[in-house]
Amino acid sequence: MHTITAIAHPNIALIKYWGKRDTARNLPATHSLSITLNTLETHTSVNFSAELSVDQVYLNKALAGNTFSARVSACLNEFRKLAGIDKFASVHTNNNFPTAAGLASSASGFAALLTAANAAVESPLDLRQLAILARQASGSAGRSLFGGYVIQHCGQQNDGSDSYAEPLFPAKHWPLEVVIAITSEQEKTTGSTAGMLHTAATAPYWQAWVDRSAEDIHAATTAIQQRDFSALAEVAEASCLAMHALMQSARPGLLYWNAATVELIHKIRHLRASGLAVFFTIDAGPQVKAVCLPEAADKVEAALANVPGVLRTLRCSLGAGARVVNDAE
Ligand code: PMV
């Protein structure tokens, strides 16, 4: 067997996933709706080899730590069961953006891993199976298999067979742009799984958060379908702030923001009030993602770059789903 390389992009949720209805199977308690980005990339090469007695995992050109390697192996174990293969793999995965800082590197990582692994076997799985495996590895990873606007269903079945991501609208339906304001290059202190379990166990507003999910998904889907920026801004900011309020209401509260994160929220709201089509979203980290109409993006980027505490900005459009690439790409 030879080496197969796949590329995947991070996605950011406009309607957020936070919390699990089943921890062992990694089933989300809420639906989520995301956009897949371009520019930011994970490249992952997979080579299944009879010579190996364990999986060998390299992250950003160095041997990966135990936690990361164990997650990759756990994902490959599930893949091997379904794909009927018993060989171990060497895996090289590289991100061109900060790992584990709230930029969804696990999502693009597992989407790229599964896409490469699937292209390396004789009987590939279908996309639904791949989306379920990706979701098992990281709740948001199934969303990075697809481009444009993507929904992750929380599903109701105990076995998770109806909890998968699927595309909603292609990127060209409404090509929004994203400016990411980086406010810290540090890895986050509380990973999303630990944070979600702690939140579900201790936050008093937990059930209200879960109950609201379907309504927010409906509002966001309608806004995207109608290309109604104000309506999307309203529901996306509400979902983001509700998720962070929920985390902060846990005991002890989880606070992923720094001072610059708060400055950026105010700045973006001020820009929108002054007529620029922009809204914010924030994940389990201090970076702020400003989603805007293409004509607003230059002004938004210039304004955010000047906010105290912003280290640098990144610019993305909507991107494609995970795919196999030639080694030259
Ligand atoms: O996929 P995970 O386990 O890294 O969780 C992602 C959680 C958020 O990024 C905060 C929200 C989301 O829906 O992407």
Image: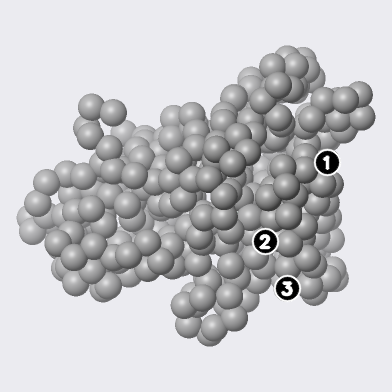
Callout 1 environment at 10 Å: few (<14), some (14 to 19), or many (20+)? Answer: some
Real-space Cα distance between discs 2 and 1? 24 Å
For label 3, the residue is: 201
Residue 268 showing in the rendered view: yes
Cβ(mark 2) to ligand 1 < 8 Å? Answer: yes
User: Disc 2 designates what residue?
Assistant: 18
Rendering quarter of residue 298 = top right
Q: Residue at x 37, y 68 (%)?
A: 129
List x then y, in percent, for residue 26: 52, 70
Q: Secondary structure at mark 3?
A: helix
Tell me the residue that label 1 is attached to. 230
Tell me whether the residue at label 2 lies in contact with that at label 1, contact meaning CB atoms closer than 8 angstroms: no
Q: Amino acid at mark 3?
A: Ala
Q: Hey, what amino acid is under mark 2?
A: Trp
Residue at 73% x, 62% y is 218
The label nearer to you, 2 versus 1, is 1
